[in-house]
Amino acid sequence: MRLSNMLISTLREVPGEAEIISHQLMLRAGLIRKSATGIYTFMPTGVRVLRNVENIVREEMNEAGAQELSASALIPASLWQESGRWDAYGPEMFRLKDRNGRDFCLGPTHEEIFTDLARSEIKSYKQLPLNLYQIQMKYRDERRPRFGVMRSREFLMKDAYSFDKDSEGLDKSYDKMHEAYSKIFTRCGLEFSAVEADSGAIGGSSSAEFMVKSDSGEDEIAFCSKCSYAANTEKATSQLSEKSSEAEKELIKVETPDVKTIEELEKFFNTDSKKFAKTLIFKAGEQVIGVMVRGDRTLNETKLTNAIEGNFELEMADEATVLEVTGAEVGFAGPIGLKVDLLFVDEEVVSMKNFIVGANETGYHYDNVNYGRDFEGTIGDFRTVVEGDCCPKCGAPINIRRGVEVGHIFKLGTKYSSAMGANYLDENGKEQPLVMGCYGIGVNRTVAAIIEQHYDENGITWPMEIAPYKVIVMPANMKNEEQVAVSEKLYNELKANRIEVLLDDRNERVGVKFKDLDLIGIPMRITVGKKVTEGMVEFKLRTGNDIEEVTIENAVERIKAELEKNNIRF
Ligand code: ATP
Ligand code: MG
């Protein structure tokens, strides 16, 4: 491609709306343009990058034995009603009607479509196992679209669905996908780890997220400092410290005027927040829920949501509801005499002795409270793990790091096949539900994640396989006929070798040209300058400082050697 013919949309300034580096660089390098909140156009170079990632995904999925198909993004409501998710999915789903008033949605994910397909196409165990995938746009009306294509409302996803006879089969299919994902993200040049994850709205028994380490990631991951334990903090748990052996003291009510927050309580009681248990009040649809965690802890809302049955949006209770269930102002809630539909108690609170809670009476707290003797509830894990907690596997301290979720694999089991009647006939001619797995990769989020790990002060430093073009040939002076002629010759030779090459034939100062190309991140550059009279040109890697002099004859070989070193076919 000749740069003189190309739409180049580089920006010198950092766009104000872009908070994170990948978003800034995608805008500055002209890879994307925003068309509305959370909706982007991929520009010519952006598309090439996207296709490169997509092709890696496609190759590794095919290699793992999965088969590509392509379903519509437009899905009739009837399928979602069958699975029960038409009501459960909530405001993230883009819903629309056709001219006859029938309900449709723009698919946020495709479990229903693939389960429907499987129930009509799969008849017998002989057709199993099967893994079907597509790479296609998904639509989610995100509560907070942000960070450019990291969290957009339309995004390219590779979604795959596996069908097996039984759970052993599913384990194998899942492991295969785990392996394929590792290959994909390695080829994308990413430093990543697979971590235990919450299964969320999609449901199912076990799942792992592929997390790219990055300070701008929206997820928090708990890593053990010693063993291999790693989990999203939505799911991560910690070992409890030994149950206190302190003798139970007599319950006392203490007057605590205007003492509401944990900080105020710490001062008033002259003790630290670990001696308190806080009681938080939520609304989950019609139900009012109380949940207790230790005073210094943050409640894990994902864990709480998972513990409650039914479809609802969890929200903090308003003041009126708090007054109704506690009989007190906000700040004095406690478990004794609390009138909630359900009370959940974090297991850590159960192991505490003689702690302080609100007395459900404005201006009062109870001290020397003990679980079992003074109140009871449903015990579970409702706390958010923090740095320094003990690893649930080995007890060593946990570290917390930020990450970007680029892929997610789930064992669904028979959740969808049972709901939708997707069965097969087993060896004995008996009907059995298909055992399913599902596997997603955010293709454009992966592009952004690659940039988060590959940039410098001048712009993007694409891994070779991802780069939109591999080489740029640049005459230093467009007015010098010999430089231009040699550049044209090298450009044509590289093209003849099917190497993705650019020719910078713009009448710009060389400094301007270098700036653009460094920003876009073309990995190799051939500069045809003054030394062309001696038969020499310059070769430079985007990520290195060295400028190598090579002969005109050897220039193409030098580039091929670099591509081979990076396992790039051409
Ligand atoms: P998140 O927790 O980030 O919202 P998710 O758990 O909703 O992600 P999945 O339903 O598992 O995501 O979707 C599979 C993959 O699609 C994710 O791993 C992620 O890479 C990508 N993805 C999800 N939502 C978006 C989005 N709004 N924009 C871009 N990519 C997304
Ligand atoms: Mg989401």
Image (spheres, grey):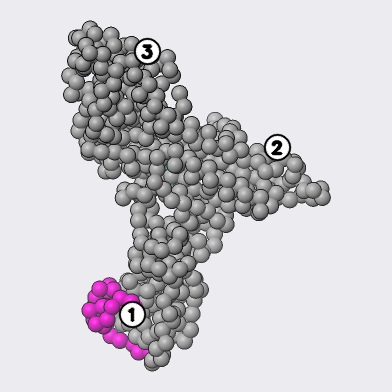
Mark identifier at residue 121: 2
Q: Label 1: which residue?
A: 275
- Label 3: how many residues lie within 10 Å, few (<14), some (14-19) or many (20+)? some
Spatial CA span between label 1 and label 2: 60 Å
Note whether ligand 1 is within 8 Å of mark 2.
no
Secondary structure beneath label 3: helix
523 lies above or below 77: above
Q: Give, as a single range, the part of the protein colored magenta.
A: 251-276
Q: Position of residue 53 (x, y in %)?
A: 44, 34
Foreground mark, 3 or 2? 3
Can residue 273 be found in the magenta stretch? yes
Label 1 CA crowd tier, 10 Å (few <14, some 14–19, many 20+): many
Relative side of 545 to 226, left or right: left
Q: CA distance from mark 3 to mark 2?
A: 49 Å
Query: Disc 1 or 3, which lies upstream in sequence?
Result: 1
Q: Residues within 10 Å of mark 2 (few under 14, many from 20)?
A: few
